[in-house]
Amino acid sequence: MPVRIARAEDRDAVIALMTNLWPDEDGAVLGRGAIFVWERAEGGDGRLGGFAQVEIRPYVNGGEQAPCPHLEGWWVDPDLRRRGIGRALVAAVEDWCRARGFAELTSDVLLANRRSLAVHPRLGFVPTERVQYFRKALTED
C-alpha cells in the first residue's frame, strides 16, 4: 500500500480529505502530530485517497500512559473502502508511535458513528469508557 507521511505540497489535498470527516476543517490541525496519506496508484498523479492523523496528547481518557498518542481520525474515499487502506493507514500510525517509544494508541468515536464503532475492534482497539459531554453557557448571548 502506498502510505506515506504527508508533505507540504499535500496541504490542500489533505484539508480536502479532512473536510469529509470534519466539515469545518480549515487546516489548523496541520503541523500537529503526524498525518499519513494513502496515495492513489492509478494514473501516477499523486492524488490522495485517504488519511490518518495522530497527535500526542498530554492525557487521554482510557489511556494508561501520559502523554499518549491519539488517533484523531482517519478517512478513506468511499470508492476505495474495504481494500485494506484504512488498516494500512492505522498500521503506519502504530509504527510511528512505536518508533517514538509509545506502548499504546488511543482513539475515540462518536456513539452515533456505528461504522467506526464496528471498525475499531477489528483493528485491535478495545473499549475503555463511554463519556457524555455537557456544556453550560455562562453568558446570556
Image (spheres, helix red, strand yellow):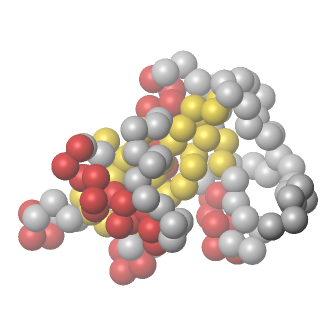
Number of numbered labels in the structure image? 0
Where on the picture, by quarter, is residue 73?
Answer: bottom right
Say above or below: 78 vs 86: below
Left-right relation of 126 to 47: right
Residue drawn at 40 percent across, 45 percent down: 30
Q: Quadrant of the N terminus?
A: bottom left
* Residue for point 59% across, 53% down: 123
Q: Point out the residue furthest to the front here.
A: 140
Where residue 128 sits in the image (x, y, percent)?
83, 46
- Report the quarter where the C terminus lies: bottom right
For the point 47% across and 47% down, which residue is it?
A: 29
Residue 24 placement (x, y as % from top left) = 51, 66
Farthest residue, direction left: 44
Position of residue 136 measured from the top left corner of the image (x, y, whole percent): 90, 59
Horizontally, residue 131 falls left or right of residue 19, namely: right
- The residue at the point 51 percent across, 71 percent down is 23
Q: Is residue 88 visible?
A: no
- Residue 46 lies left or right of residue 113; in this view the side is left
Q: Is residue 33 visible?
A: yes
Image height of 20 relative to 44, above or below? below
Q: Which residue in the rendered view is the most extreme toward the bottom? A: 79
Residue 111 versus residue 95: which sits nearer the camera? 111
Task: Classify residue 136 as left or right of residue 35.
Answer: right
Please determine whether, in this image, residue 90 is positioned above or below residue 56: below
